[in-house]
Amino acid sequence: MAAKLNLSESSDVDPSSLNDQSVSSRSSNRSLRVAEKERRKIEAEDPFVLALKYFCDVEAGTPVYGNDEVENNLVLVEKVAYSKGLSPEAISIMLEFAMSLRMGTTLCARVLKCLIPATVVPQEAVVRAVVWLGVGKIPLSTQVLFIKWVLTIFDMIDAKDQLRAVYGFIFSFVTEENLCPFICHLLYLLTRKESVRVFRVRKLLELQSKLGRQAFLLHLLSLYKVFCPELVTLSIPSRMRSGFRNHNSPWKSALIAVQKRNSSQVASSIGLAFTIKDKATSRKRKHCHLELPALSSVVNKQAQTEQSSSRKVVPLVQIHSFTQLLENMHHIELPAQMGSLLGSSLALQYLDCVQDESALLRLNFWLGYALHEEFLFCNGGGASQNSEEAMRFLNMLLSTQHFLQEGFSSSEAFLYKFLTVWDGSLLRPQILGLLSNIPVIPSSQIGRLLFEPLTQLFFTSSLFFKCGLMDCLNNMLLKWLTWHSVYALEDDLDISLNSHTSINMTLSGFKDSVMELVHFVGRLASVGLQLEGCHSLLLSFIMDFYETVCDTFLKYGLPLVVMPPPGVFYPALLATDPVSVDRLAYIMYRYKVNLTSAKSQERLTEQAFHISRQTFREFNSYVVVMVNCLWNSKMFQPGIQGIQLGEELLLKSNVPQYWTSFDLIHHPAFMSYAVDFHQKCWPRRKEMDLSSIKHSKPWSWYLEYLFTQGYDGLKLFVQSNINWQLPAGDGQDNSLSTQQQ
């Protein structure tokens, strides 16, 4: 039926139209053949193509000296390489020519230095070049140069499966002392769980006994220990220098220039920081691009198909939903460039769910390298010249840390170094955000790593930096206390500070670190308020910090109570804005609740912590001062706790009844409320007499009026610390409730 239908339809077609179509088809094919012939003719006449053909066909033993042809062809290849970059085919031809030593060792290093990829590097070419290392005729300096080149363009190699297949062959070169650092770096990038073998661990341990505790050996052993902890019994330091040594590379600046000229990013971007050397003798790095690499697979598409059929591996780049992530959770292939995880929410969910230590190690290595290159090894450039790009990168890092609810060890190590050279203004919100995510620092190191550089920055910076730092330290304390409440063991003897590290700290050590941080902030706040004239904005951030400190016992289960210093208490009590006084009252109320709860638990159980008598004395003295100041109108009087001023000085101030200057009526923070209340209570009075508010009924009305203005902290403080009853006659009858020890 279909055949008949087609015949009937074709019978309706005009024969002339069919003839026209065939003529146009023949003319189109003819034009294509002509264009292809012309292209081949132009290509055959292209000097660069002829130069590549020369290096491809040159016979072994051809002399170099006096050979103008090889010099001209090589100059042409270098010109194209440094201007546009070399295609994958050109990379394969030139790499094979250099490593096979067809014209001796003279040109080998020169050819390697001009291997600047325009797009990707064929894996087969790299594998063939690695095999040439085993011939034994290549000079050691050239071998080092080749491995450096592989490390530089590692993320541009189109696949890694064949390189991993010759892992054992590459490992055999670790015995070469000059090659060992670079081979260990390459092995670190290629290592998988199946690569870890007992004989390789033994060989690395033998090298360590011979060469000492070298960083490159320890990093490779640490990765081996992650995959097979039962094979590596060596104790790996928990805080090692981040990443491998940053070796100068002759290709990095050329790669940046080529990518800029081509105006396109490689699919598997370099992602690592590239260097432009300023001077021949300078070891300082300069600006690099902090763009996150694209999420791409480790292997090419053909290899993906083969692996998927054999091992059921699913590249992470092929996961597009959370459902797919759950279905393939144990068959996911990590991307070629670990930095691409920062830009993918699904990748971060995988990282958070699986807790893959090897992935975290690789990500920390990439991140540490990028941060050090951009911010620490720059010379007059770097992030300061491209703050928008650096800001995007750090914001992405911050969002990643917030998603994972913890920081990276590489960013922590970077911050300790960066604080010593930071001016306090460059990318301030991002740096302070990263700083608030660092884990607990032992009390023996916190002063050197954190307090010393922050002290210099605090006292030499603006008011807004001081406020930002106070907010940063408050967030840091909140996260420390949260980690304690989440990861504390039931016996309260040992806590794990980070789910991805082996750093453990005793409860007493954790308390010491928190106490050091609180005392440090107290010192900064006391001096900072003096420098800034008790600015209300700075005081607000300080009050935020002590609202966290006053609840460490009840909210976070930490057996610790630390009172604010007088340099913070009195500026808040005598502040000119009512919000600060109200917040101080709330903080003192929470201190009382925490101390009362801790005291009751201390009486009921023997294991509860013991509160020092000094803490109770400080709290009681502060409460007495506040009650005498705000309630009893006994400020500055002799024999009364609080600020003591000479009577002659007080008389010279010409302030009438100076002892009432800071009660709830005459306090500068509440004077406007007292005046407003007086006008509402006695609207017909011509003269203002605020002392009349102290009478019993107006006083109770005035307190209710204040409490309805939203000053809940003041209300809670009065209710919890003052036993006040409305008497039958005028006056007030009140008593003070304090904590006893």
Image (tube, rainbow, N blue to C red):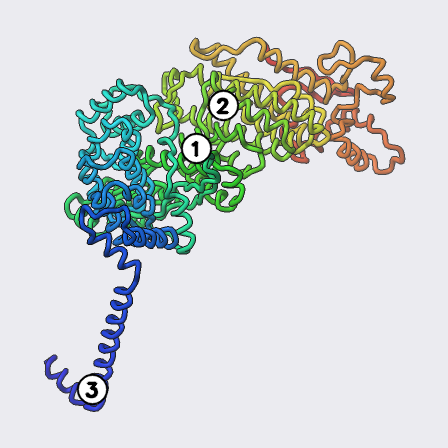
Examine the rendered structure and indicate whether residue 141 appears above or below residue 1.
above
Residue 477 is situated, as x and y percent measured from the top left of the image, at 50, 26
Quadrant in the picture for residue 397 = top left
**SS assignment at label 3:** helix
Is residue 161 visible from the viewing direction of this image?
A: no
Is residue 7 visible from the viewing direction of this image?
A: yes
**184 left or right of 565 in image:** left
Residue depicted at 59% across the width and 28% down the height: 457
Judge by depth and name the residue closer to the eye, 590 or 514: 514
Residue 125 is situated, as x and y percent measured from the top left of the image, at 22, 47
- Which quadrant of the figure contains the N terminus? bottom left
Kind of residue at badge 3: Leu
Kind of residue at badge 1: Ser
User: What numbered label is drawn on residue 411?
Assistant: 1
- The residue tagged 3 is 18
Alpha carbon distance from label 2 to label 3:
84 Å
**557 left or right of 733 in image:** left
User: What numbered label is drawn on residue 449?
Assistant: 2
